[in-house]
Image (cartoon, rainbow, N blue to C red):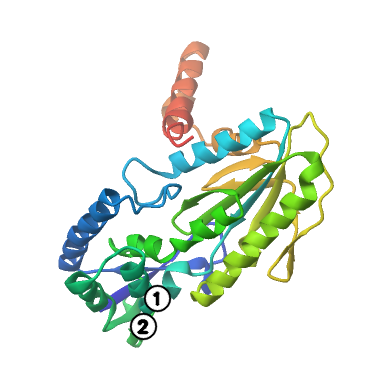
Amino acid sequence: MLILSPLLKKSNIDFESFTNFRPVSNLKFLSKLVEKSVSGQLNNYLVENDLHEQYQSAYKAFHSTETALVKITNDILLSLDRGEHVFLLLLDLSAAFDTVSHSLLLSRMEKRFGISGIVLKWFESYLSNRSQFVNINGTRSATHDVNIGVPQGSVLGPLLYLIYTSPLAEIINRYNLKYHLFADDTQIYISFNTTDVATSKQRVEDCVAEICHWMNSNELKLNHDKTEIMLIHSRYRNKPPVDDFNIELEKVPITAALVKSLGVGFDEHMMFDSYVADKFCAPNILPLDIRKSSSVYAFKKSVKTHLFSKFVSSKSLFM
């Protein structure tokens, strides 16, 4: 029995829209202990048999959003240094964890990852006979059976999701595009010269078309509203003309201003000025001890100490 607590994805978005909430499962303590043990054993199995996707940075030891961002930004900056342009696609899935097919997941675990016998039976038991209800401030909904999806907020769910979406990397590799994954965030990019704009654009469109076809057959769905495309180019070179991308029969315009990759924003010149200004230069009310400083020197020292502690020390590690 799962107890779902709706969690607003961001504090500044419309709380009256159901799509802006993430259904987080409140699991029992004993269940979490069992899942933690199984997750550790499954992860060790994937590591020992080299079954982890190389460019997936989520839920892996010594990997994080930082490793993903460093890889992506480094590749793009090297391309700009060579005088090339870059198409960057940020693909977003709709309710990815909630639409995982149990039968397809179990089949993939057996055929692609060699998990069989009593171990596979355990996972089948783990996924079956589940039910859930929503609890909001003590008011609960009716109970419903759960025949699809992996629990958000669980220990084991994210690792099962990575197994479920493992074919994505093979699709992207077939088109010789670069990519990096972090859970359900997929970022695809390709560098090209001005003379290769049309062919590079076509490769990207063909790749995304196959990804969409694979998603449809695996009960996943691309969120067109949140899928972003950016043409990145050096500020010292002219921007090549490019038409809108055709993705799944829908025109997706090229974003010209700012995109966010795993929470970090940059513009079409691969500059972080706007993001840094937003994070570090926003006006804040100074604490009382600074306002009461007895001298100009003490005031300046207090301000610098406060700003370093609040904006630099607390955020620089993520940057």
Residue 147 tag number: 2
Nearest the viewer among 125 and 98 is 125
Nearest the viewer among 36 and 187 is 187
* Identity of the residue drawn at 69% across and 48% down: 230
Q: Position of residue 127 (x, y in %)?
A: 29, 76
Mark 1: few, some, or many residues within 10 Å (few <14, many ≥20)?
few
From the image, state whether disc 1 or disc 2 is nearer to you.
1
* Identity of the residue drawn at 70% across and 36% down: 269
Quarter that holds the N terminus: bottom left
Q: Position of residue 33 (x, y in %)?
A: 17, 61
Total numbered labels = 2
Tell me the amino acid under the disc marked 2: Asn
Q: Quadrant of residue 62?
A: top left
Q: Is residue 272 visible?
A: no
Q: Position of residue 204 (x, y in %)?
A: 67, 55
Nearest the viewer among 170 and 38 is 170
Reading the image, the residue beneath label 1 is: 104
Q: Determine whether, in the image, residue 118 is placed left or right of residue 78.
A: left
In the figure, 43 relative to 16: above or below?
above
